[in-house]
Amino acid sequence: MELKVVERSATAESRLTSAQSVEVQDKVRDHPCFSKDAHHHYARMHVAVAPACNIQCHYCNRKYDCANESRPGVVSELLTPELAVKKVLAVAAEIPQLSVLGIAGPGDPLANPERTFATFAELSEKAPDIRLCVSTNGLMLPAHVDQLCEHNIDHVTITINCIDPEIGARIYPWIFWHNRRIRGKKAAAILIEQQLKGLEMLAERGVLVKINSVLIPGVNDQHLAEVSRVVKQKGAFLHNIMPLIAEPEHGTFYGLMGQRTPTSQELNAVQQACANDMDIMSHCRQCRADAIGMLGQDRHAEFTLERIESLEIDHAAAMERRAQVRAEIERQRAAKRSRPQPPVLVSLDALTGAKPVPKSRPNDKHAAAPAVSLTKPGFKVAVASHDGQQVDQAFAEAQTFAIYQLDVAHAPRLLETRTVPAAGADLSAALAGVKDCGAVLCTRIGFDAWQQLEAAGIRPLSVQPGTSMRAALAQAQAETAAAITANLDALAPALSA
Amino acid sequence: MSYRITAACVNCWACEPLCPNEAVRAAKPHFVIEAARCNGCEGEFADPQCASICPIEGAILDPSGAPVNPPGSLTGIPPSAWSQVQQAIQAR
């Protein structure tokens, strides 16, 4: 199994392209900020219950009250948790596409833990169908990870602009930490440490973490690819690189001091530099901390407090309606998906749910184990197929596998058709039947089989039932090539060891 | 002698939960420190807590009436940059 090491780190890799893994797909299906496709269908809202902040960023002005702007940190109306819940329920009754409630400020949700968690607690009781998420600067994240998990929050966004305190000192003038205001490099070092620790803790608990980074030309533009690499390694799911917003009239440090904003070419270039390392989000609309509606749309002005107080709402009926609207949205999306299009390869390592797959480290056993030859011509893929045309079998049922030779440079070549005992009846016999292969391609795969395939160094992959063999193999080939390229760096220490 | 909150306060709530003496409370048009309760955090913390988290320059005055966080001390924005922008806006 000469590609074992490559495949190992490749699976960690593809956990991050996991807009594609089944369980992750399920989690992001209706989250407009985590799934590019979802933002065409579902709406989100933010409630401004968290006014206090514990750090200062040079792109933020804490005199935030403004009704006419659409940018992060800006709100016009601060809400108590009680009013916030009322507002969410009113919006959810009028906009049945509402799937996500986020708390994003205008300060930091975790600098206001009582208000934030009071809001979540009441909402998870009154509108359990609405997903809850937070966007935080991360300073107080490690202290609140368990509480976030208790409230069933499965999406968290952390703003990480740098992992180097020297750079951080040019972005964050101070933080409030352990009852003191701390400045400069020391402050940035504490913030970065907490952010990365919080990220790891969330990833360990299976929470999807998106990293937001503000691209600041001349400050962190050269550094964000490194940020991407590190946050991916620590388990982040998506990296969202946003352009700095800085106008003198916003009264921010960068705005007043003439810090320039990135051009769209610069933004694209940095996003591409980071894309080698993980999924990059490209549909962010940088919305207000009290935005309501579809991304890019803001209906917050329609939901004034007076109006919310005056609305009479049948909450049970509203929830029923949301369920219907969602079913219809999903029906339409499924119909669209069933039209011919490139298959989505699913890396199954995220299927275990709660806990992400351990990542290869240069010094761990897997990475140090067998000698890796990247010059070997390729590996075999066992494709679960009845008719030899389509991927149409779950691993548990499949008894006929088409064995293809796959390598980066050539078209996939059929070597043989092989009969193997069904894994559902005899898992170890099925594993023995494909033990010379580097990957198994099927429509579905159970947890045990997945684990054992992984342990044997065989990469489990799944596609939509009925995907043509050719399309699935082409995709597997492309993904493997990308994974190998992306992992050369990670492998270097193991190879030289 | 007590610390004091000025009209520059933006009502962000950051100071309120930190006060060991519950001297800070929400009020209109802005938060206030009850003089009788405030002891400047003496014996409790090295620095007065409200002034250590307050993000607004000039919003909290020390017992002598001087701003704990004078202009430029928190944002790094020199006061001259502010006045230039204000002039530019007024000229429009």
Image (spheres, rainbow, N blue to C red):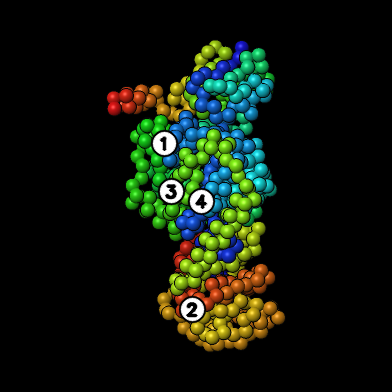
Q: Name the residue rendered at 54%, 52% in the picture.
A: A96
Closer-to-camera residue (B50/A363): B50
Gap in angstroms between the C-alphas marked 2 and 4: 34 Å
Of the image marks 4 and 1, the number of the one nearer the N terminus:
4
Q: Position of residue A337 (x, y in %)?
A: 49, 68
- Does the rendering let one see residue A9? no
Closer-to-camera residue (A396/A47): A47
SS assignment at label 2: strand
Mark toward the viewer: 3 or 2: 3
- The residue at the far left in this view is B91
Q: Report which residue position mark 1 lands on.
A: A68
- Packing grade of label 3 (10 A; few <14, some 14-19, many >=20) is some
Amino acid carrying label 2: it is Ser
| Numbered circle sitting on residue A468 | 2
Amino acid carrying label 4: it is Ala
Q: Report which residue position mark 4 lands on.
A: A43
Of the image marks 3 and 1, the number of the one nearer the N terminus:
1
SS assignment at label 4: strand
Residue A71 sits in which quadrant? top left
